Image (tube, rainbow, N blue to C red):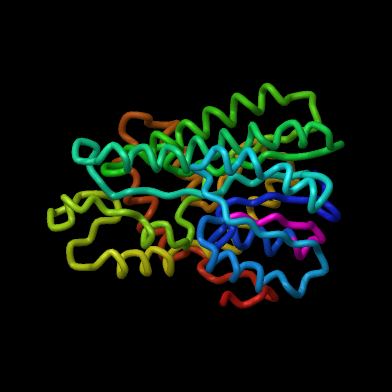
Amino acid sequence: MKDFMSKVAVITGAGSGMGRYLAVLLAKSGCDVVICDVNEDTLAGTVAMLKNYNVAVSSHRLDVGDEAAINALPEKVIAQHGKVDLVFNNAGITIDSDFANMPEPDWNKVMDVNLHGVVNMTRAFLPYLKERPESAVVNTSSIFGMIAVPRQSVYHATKFAVRGFTESLAKEMKGTSVQVHCVHPGHIGTNILSAAKVNPSEEKEEKKGMFARPDATQEEQGEAFRQNGMHASKAAEVILNGVRKRRSRIFVGLDAKLIDLAQRLTPMHYDKLLPFIFLPLALFRNKKGLKDLPVEP
């Protein structure tokens, strides 16, 4: 896809992080945006950031774990915008818990949002995308769709599945007008850690997960995670450049590229290489946002 001018893009998880900045950068490029999020307050913040761009904006409260709500969305979008050219399945959540102690409802919730939401959004909008001369489905997996760490079993299950679903769909759509992209973000400065649910039965236990620091609260760890990651606007820029260049897999950040290499070179022992990837890159990662963008509310 050469450019986004006069296109219409649907974005889930647009109330913060990469989803918010995908909306901003697309609007800056002349693309009408349909922004969706379960949190109406943060969604309103994204709307405020888009007010100075001369594009059509519609916002929808959407729980991507709700299949009925997803199935009702395309008709609303077509009524408001007349077409759909791009769908960014970006919404995601996680839970910090050992698998053995994870309540089944929590497992199912993450599966519904991270996996079923992607599949159901793709199914709902694909007929409309096929009608366009050029269009794209952009699904967010993760570096955790390439490697695994403790206490993130359900997140890994969803992100590996999104990767497999997306790569298969890309093969099915070959020769059509629909581009299909799988995004693997590395450490991006979003609020996913601060928003993560923690298993209440384990709150006082010593944890050995990737982000566990016994000397810090979840809020402190979440803020440190956000501050030390690639700025979400930079991540959104990388994703959109990947769509422009028709890259089927889009690695966001040097850490994502190195992790992909590590798991290819030593698929059973890549965990021994992770400290040599994450720790040095934390010192050099670009944590500043893009210039000339609206200030977040």
Q: Quadrant of the C terminus?
A: bottom right
Residue 13: percent from left, percent from top? 55, 54
Residue 204 falls in image quadrant: bottom left
Is residue 55 in the magenta section?
A: no
Residue at coordinates 20% horizontally, 53% vertically from top-left? 200
Q: Is residue 88 or residue 239 the one in the foreground?
A: 88
Which quadrant would residue 170 be assigned to in this image? top right
Tell whether 113 sits left or right of 207. Answer: right
Rendered-image quadrant of the N terminus: top right
Q: Nearer the viewer, residue 292 or 283?
A: 292
Please give the name of the residue rendered at 79% of the width and 24% of the height, measured from the top-left corner: 175
- Placement of 165 over or under 285, stated as above or below: above
Q: Is residue 159 above or below residue 60?
A: above
Q: In the rendering, at what x and y percent does residue 64 appear?
A: 53, 45
> Against 224, is 23 above or below?
above
Residue 108 versus residue 36 in the image, above or below: above
Q: Is residue 290 left or right of residue 286?
A: right
Magenta-drawn segment? 27-36
Q: Residue at x 24, y 56 (%)?
A: 212
Q: Is residue 201 left or right of residue 7?
A: left
Place of residue 186 in the rendered image (x, y in percent of width and height, measured from the top left)? 48, 51
Count of labels in the image: 0
Viewer-closest of 231 and 282: 231
Quarter of the image holding residue 35?
Answer: bottom right
Q: Position of residue 32 (x, y in %)?
A: 78, 57
**Residue 34 is a magenta residue:** yes
254 and 67: which one is in front? 67
